[in-house]
Amino acid sequence: AQSVTQLDSQVPVFEEAPVELRCNYSSSVSVYLFWYVQYPNQGLQLLLKYLSGSTLVESINGFEAEFNKSQTSFHLRKPSVHISDTAEYFCAVSQGYSTLTFGKGTMLLVSP
Amino acid sequence: DAGITQSPRYKITETGRQVTLMCHQTWSHSYMFWYRQDLGHGLRLIYYSAAADITDKGEVPDGYVVSRSKTENFPLTLESATRSQTSVYFCASSEGLAGWSDEQFFGPGTRLTVL
């Protein structure tokens, strides 16, 4: 069975500071990894995903995540956050032949 | 409008009543999904469908019924609503061409309250 752990339910940060949202997964086989973002009162939208190849993946708005197989992690980072990044972030995993399993989410709160 | 829509956006009902939540997508995506979002639980899969007339249970299917007679529609029915089904419900779709690595596109959600 696969599972996802997001260690922080809430991460407060000041604008222009760096941030890391942590995600660990458990799976005995190869996985696909995703980060989805949910802005207030909206549905989720894909931020980035890792399928294979380079372990570092980037999004168009400055986020990046690194797949670390030995630590079974897929942490999300941004070097300088903006107020508009305030949202809930969900890590998700699929074993390729199974449905997506989502973590419980991390609320990123960016203040001026 | 192109995309994925859900109706109603808000619904209040009473325990024991039947409720149907609608989901419609205009992309002709093969896969469609129903999730519920609850504080402290994240998103949990209720049911999914790989194509018209093909549905399968997810993690929390009890108390829900789905059907998919047309590719673009995927209604979710609560046959006898209970307070524990108070939640925000999200419908999603994906092309299905690359299996479970495909991006899922989410609707805006339906906030359901069962009194």
Image (cartoon, coloured by chain):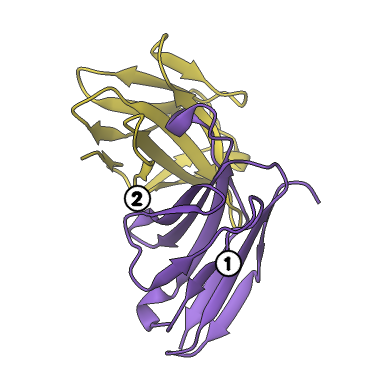
The answer to whether residue A111 is seen in the rendering is no
Under mark 2, the amino acid is: Lys
Residue at 53% x, 58% y: name it.
Answer: B90
What residue sits right under mark 1 in the picture? B110
Task: Say if labels 1 and 2 share a chain.
Answer: no
Quarter of the image holding residue B86? bottom left
Q: Secondary structure at mark 2?
A: loop
> Which shade is chain A?
yellow
In this rendered view, identify the residue nearer to me: B48 or A32.
B48
Residue at 18% x, 28% y: name it.
Answer: A28
Which x, y percent locates residue B6? Answer: 65, 62
Which x, y percent locates residue B69? Answer: 60, 59
Neighbours of disc 1 within 10 Å: few (<14), some (14-19), many (20+): many
The answer to whether residue A81 is seen in the rendering is yes
Question: Which chain is drawn using purple?
Answer: B
Q: CA distance from mark 1 to mark 2?
A: 19 Å
Under mark 1, the amino acid is: Thr
**Image side of residue A103 versus residue A3, left or right:** right
What residue sits right under mark 2 in the picture? A104
Residue at 45% x, 40% y: name it.
Answer: A13
Which x, y percent locates residue A16? Answer: 55, 30
Q: Chain of mark 1?
A: B
- The answer to whether residue B43 is above or below residue A37 is below
Neighbours of disc 2 within 10 Å: few (<14), some (14-19), many (20+): many
Which x, y percent locates residue A25? Answer: 26, 34
Q: How many marks?
A: 2
**Image side of residue A40 versus residue A109, left or right:** right
Q: Which numbered marker is on residue B26?
A: none
In this rendered view, identify the residue nearer to me: A67 or B15.
B15
- The answer to whether residue B29 is above or below residue A20 is below
